[in-house]
Image (spheres, grey):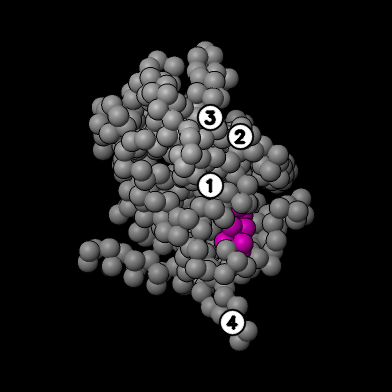
Amino acid sequence: MKLWCVALIVGLVGCDARVDHFGANKLYGLVVARRDAVDSAPDQASIATVVGDLFGTPNEPQVPDFASRLLDREKLVRAAGPISSDQAGNHFGLYREHCATCHGIEGGGAGPAAALLNPYPRDFRHGVFKFKSTHRADKPTAADLQRVLRRGIPGTAMPSFATIGDDDLEALVQYVVYLSLRGQTERKLIDRWSAGDLNDDELVAAAGEIAADVVAAWESAAGQIVDVPPLPSLAGDGALWWQDSDRIERGRELFHGPLANCASCHGKGGDGEAVTLDFDDWTKEYTTKLGIGPADSAALEPLRSAGALRPRQLVPRKLAWNVFHGDNSDEGLYRRLVVGIAGSPMPGLLVNEKPGGVGVEPDDVWSIIAYIRSL
């Protein structure tokens, strides 16, 4: 407990200090250099300058013209900078007050308290979010991000921020989108550098093109929401829809059978006791995708020095506990089963979502949910 307190106090004090610039994504620069077998990491000083010209600093965020429909600079200013308030009671520095201790100034998921948390805080710079209403490859909507902030993520260190005001919540959502947009632009610019040398003029043009494409992906999210069919009819007077014994039995068969095969990860009866050894996509990027074993400390040392967190095994949910990281509504569970969880090994279950066209039908998804609820 004392270690927690020290880490949080140090984190809060540090995050309230003035920070004049975003740190370069040294880890991804090293990952790309190794992945593409180039002689050296990219010129990150030049990349940082170009990205800084587009997006500003942690104290003075900027909104490129092509992002003005997506980002509201006034809300970003509320969330950015050191923690303070004005005479009218408006709060500033909201991100550092509520988020930076875990997610870090850059949104890289490696804040002062991150190493103590399991699972680790999200790295926004990948542009990948787990719990959302949209398809796997799409960005979340603003409502999705607000839902996560209001509810928190049960079973993790991510708390609920339901008690903060609506204006402050909207400012935080905007800032998370801003950090993700900025961070993904930086990552893609590093990729472009690796594909071939870019002079300064080409670097500026490439950054603008990349950022515009990422903005377009965020703007299109509202049109990519996964449709949810009507709930099945009730099992009887006073019964909940999922209490139908035939539907529960069908769900049990699918859960343990080859079409859904949920038990291979979540264990018999959802007890989470299946033997698995897997990692999320954030970790795989600097381990297995580079041919490095997650337990190979010597090979990981340069990457750890560049900012990588110690690899932690991904543990499938113990469904019988009835604690779900994401939205635990019927609609939320349906969407998660239909498209899977982005950034994780959790696949989508529908026929058209699984490789090889082997999967289940929409009504089967309701049966699986009924069985999960019955646990």
Local packing at callout 3 (Cα closer than 10 Å; few below 14, some 14-19, many 20+) is many
How many angstroms separate mark 1 from mark 3 (CA)? 25 Å
Label annotation for residue 89? 4
For badge 3, the amino acid type reads Val
Mark 4 lies on a secondary structure that is: loop
**Residue at coordinates 51% horizontally, 35% vertically from top-left?**
234
Identify the mark nearer the N-term, 1 or 3.
1
Where is mark 2, residue-wise? 230
The answer to whether marks 1 and 3 mark residues whose Cβ atoms lie closer than 8 Å is: no
For badge 2, the amino acid type reads Pro
Residue 65 spot, x, y in % from top left = 77, 54
Local packing at callout 2 (Cα closer than 10 Å; few below 14, some 14-19, many 20+) is few
Side of 116 relative to 170 (left or right): left
Identify the mark nearer the N-term, 3 or 2.
2
Residue 176 spot, x, y in % from top left = 56, 55
Mark 2 lies on a secondary structure that is: loop
- Residue closest to the far bottom: 87
Query: Closer to us: mark 3 or mark 2?
Result: 2
In the image, which residues are magenta?
170-178
Identify the mark nearer the N-term, 1 or 4.
4
How many angstroms separate mark 1 from mark 2 (CA)? 36 Å
Mark 3 lies on a secondary structure that is: helix
Where is mark 3, residue-wise? 338
Where is mark 1, residue-wise? 125
Picture mark count: 4
Identify the mark nearer the N-term, 1 or 2.
1
For badge 1, the amino acid type reads Arg
**Residue at coordinates 31% horizontally, 64% vertically from top-left?**
7
